[in-house]
Image: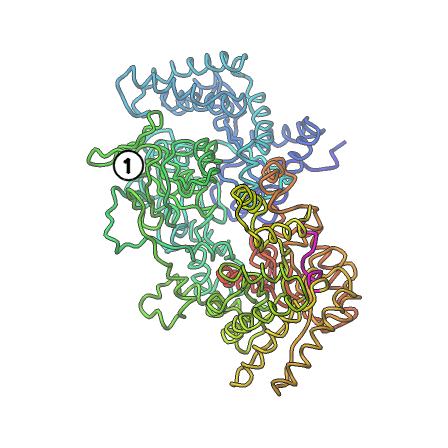
Amino acid sequence: MPPLIKFVYDFAEGNRDMKDLLGGKGANLAEMTNLKLPVPPGFTITTEACRAYLKSGRIPDGLDEEVTEHLEALEKEMGKKLGQSDDPLLVSVRSGAKFSMPGMMDTVLNIGLNDQSVRGLAAQAGNERFAFDSYRRLIQMFGKTVLGIAGEHFDDAIDAAKEAKGIESDLDLDDEDLRKLVETFKDVVITHAGRPFPQDPREQMDLAVRAVFDSWNTKRAVIYRRQERIPGDLGTAVSVCSMVFGNLDMESGTGVAFTRDPASGAQGVYGDYLQNAQGEDVVAGIRNTVPLADMETIDKSSYDELMGIMKTLEEHYRDLCDIEFTVERGKLWMLQTRVGKRTAAAAFRIAVQLVDQGLIDMDEAISRVNGAQLAQLMFPRFDHDSGTKPIARGMNASPGAAVGKVVFDSYTAVKWARSGEAVILVRRETNPDDLDGMIAAAGILTSRGGKTSHAAVVARGMGKTCVCGVEALKVDTKQRVVTAPGGRTIREGDVISIDGTSGDVYLGEVPVVDSPVVRYFEEGLDALGEDADDLVRAVDRIMNHADGVRRMSVRTNADNPEDAARARRFGAQGIGLCRTEHMFLGERRHLVERLILADTDDDRDQELAHLLPMQREDFVGILEAMDGLPVTIRLLDPPLHEFLPNITELSVRVAVAEARGEERENDLRMLQAVHRLHEQNPMLGLRGVRLGVVIPGLFEMQSRAILEAAAARLKIGGVPRVEIMVPLVANVQEFETIKHAIIEVARDVRAETGVHLEFLVGTMIELPRAALTADQIAEAAEFFSFGTNDLTQTTWGFSRDDVEAAFFSAYLEKGIFGVSPFESLDVEGVGALIETAVEKGRSRRPGLKLGICGEHGGDPDSVHFFEQVGLDYVSCSPFRVPVARLEAGRSVAGPTQD
């Protein structure tokens, strides 16, 4: 009886829309097969099979039989059997998840070779060196991937073989050398795995499939998924593909191609080619490749065919394509294609290029970029007019400006980064085991490899600055030293600067300047004139379209006129959060201290009277900067003890004074006040609306300052749009008490100034009870603003300042969190409360204005959720305003790319 679930699909049975089932590699191999492109025949084992295996720990029922059926069909099509002694069929076993995870999971090539079939391959190819080179590669990959043997044991054996002959390149090992190396590798397997290398081809294949399934949960794969926010329950598919050989001879080769430059987005011929090699040689960066354009002189026929296929694929996928290919004795074969990872700059350029070519429209163009990429483009760049000269130059693999101390291994990179050091990870070439260090580092520098090497591909995907292939630098990771031209040495801990845009490497720290994209947001396109390059113009087109289609407005969090003015230049449409507590820090702190120490109502009123004109002037400046736009001003929120001296320092000061017989009456009174106001959990104590209820006159003073500032602006022709926000409300009675007091103040201000004031009074929803009783609160409140920082704390029962250092790293490592709930909104928990509050609030007040002013207002994923639940605006820091504008547009423009 056939299995209920189909676990295996021939390449001809799938298509590119089946990524969930066939993974990215399997789906795209099927798509190329459907396009009649030269794809070696094969089949794909589905992600469902992987998930079933990972859940139960055994191969699911029916999978072996399906694999046998498809293998027999492949053998029939190819006219030979897997591992037969004469002219054997060989296959590769490759991983391929739905989302690209370059180098994170496992691949095994040349399966089917054994002590007998290697001779049949040699006879069929007429090349013993090629056959034994393929065999040693199989044992090496199988040993590392399937049997878990450390790669250094095989590397040491190769180095010893080269040293014995006095040669430097693997290519100079002859057939006899490789035959001996095969025997050495087999001994390595017995020594370190406790079993011989399997001679049964089917056993090789089955064990390789299991190993690829298992590689889904390797440490590096888990870390990469966490970094890229890829769900951990997807599993990987496995593609079994008939082998074609780029290492047959110098008329063969392998390469990686991009239909556009993944670093800049420029159109042209980009990629790497390596003669007499297999694909892993290119990606690993072990041998330095030649530019793809050189292939035209090496093998013009294959090159011309490749150019035609690249054009076909880009027009078919309507995007930059990343292609892996092999040439076997002049015959071109396509091994993989996918929508290519790209830098932030390339993403924006390519999006508008494809629009101009008529391949996509602007709605799709803004779905091809994202806020994280825009934020990267706003980072500072090196000042090339500073006079600093580079010591070397490599390939500009992933742009950006990175400065840090040199480290030579992943462990040190992570350790130093955790202690607050910026580091540059320096390697000959990286491999998947370096992922921890690559994430921790500010930038990555390698002396080998090109734009398609592991370091380049992973760095581009992470938006990390990277310079590859700096051949002028001699990297000695054992001695922890780099030798630069002229004999200069760079040791671990020395500071270097790397420019991923130009490929330059500098000694020391290079000064930075604002990026042209920031200047564009500050000054506008016309003001830049000739400085507005094609990237800035691409950003301008994308942003104009996003602004044109978005429904939500974007405000800023700003507490002073300077931040407000800058945010307005960045496109903010008002202030969503003006935190009044920030106005009492610094030199004004002593005024709050005096307010707290006031013994009588008259003393307290006197201190409030001192604060009033200062607050009023603060608000006049902010309202002027945001004239004509809404300004939401939050009344005092934090507990008063935050304005008082540290209790320990104050106690010591008083004790010392007493010991010396000195009188320190103010310090003693302050200490008594600190003890009186001390709370076990101040974030859940006397703060927010509770301050306004308990301290008479405090919120009235602040409201008067706001309304008098609005009146002053109105008298000179300004257009103030004031919204007064009451924080930390838990029930409607609290809110009504404060709102009533504000209305009374407004009546007085109107009478005193003769100005008719229009304003709103609303509240922050930052407690679960407020969300659950939002219908009652909406009876009195004219707007809600979701304070998602506190709402996250109170929903999870977290104290943010404590838990992030205490256990968040463990939660992330164990997969309890995919991402910190303070970084990206917890949609299932906090998001459900927001949805409830939106529904309940608008059921009582249909026109209720709704916004969000927590840090999530600038997080791309969170912005999409806020659009989904119908908020009117998001508010974020000034620098994040362009990001929020773009994401608000993307949230309504259509589905985003995988």
Question: Quarter of the image containing the N terminus?
Answer: top right
Q: Nearer the viewer, residue 373 or 176?
A: 373
The reply to whether residue 382 is in sight is yes
Where does the image place residue 357, in percent across and percent down from the top left?
Answer: 44, 63
How many discs mark residues in the rendered view? 1
Mark 1 element type: loop
Residue at mark 1: 471
**Rendered image quadrant of residue 234:** top right
- Check the image and report above or below for 356 versus 185: below
Magenta segment range? 682-692
Where does the image place residue 144, in percent across and percent down from the top left?
Answer: 49, 23
Q: Is residue 646 left or right of residue 279?
A: right
The reply to whether residue 549 is in sight is no
Q: Is residue 519 left or right of residue 703?
A: left
Badge 1: how crowded within 10 Å, few (<14), some, or many (20+)? some
Query: Residue at image x 59%, y 73%?
Result: 705
Q: Magenta span has 267?
A: no
Identify residue type, mark 1: Glu
Where does the image place residue 673, in percent across and percent down from the top left?
Answer: 64, 53
Magenta part, dominant SS: helix
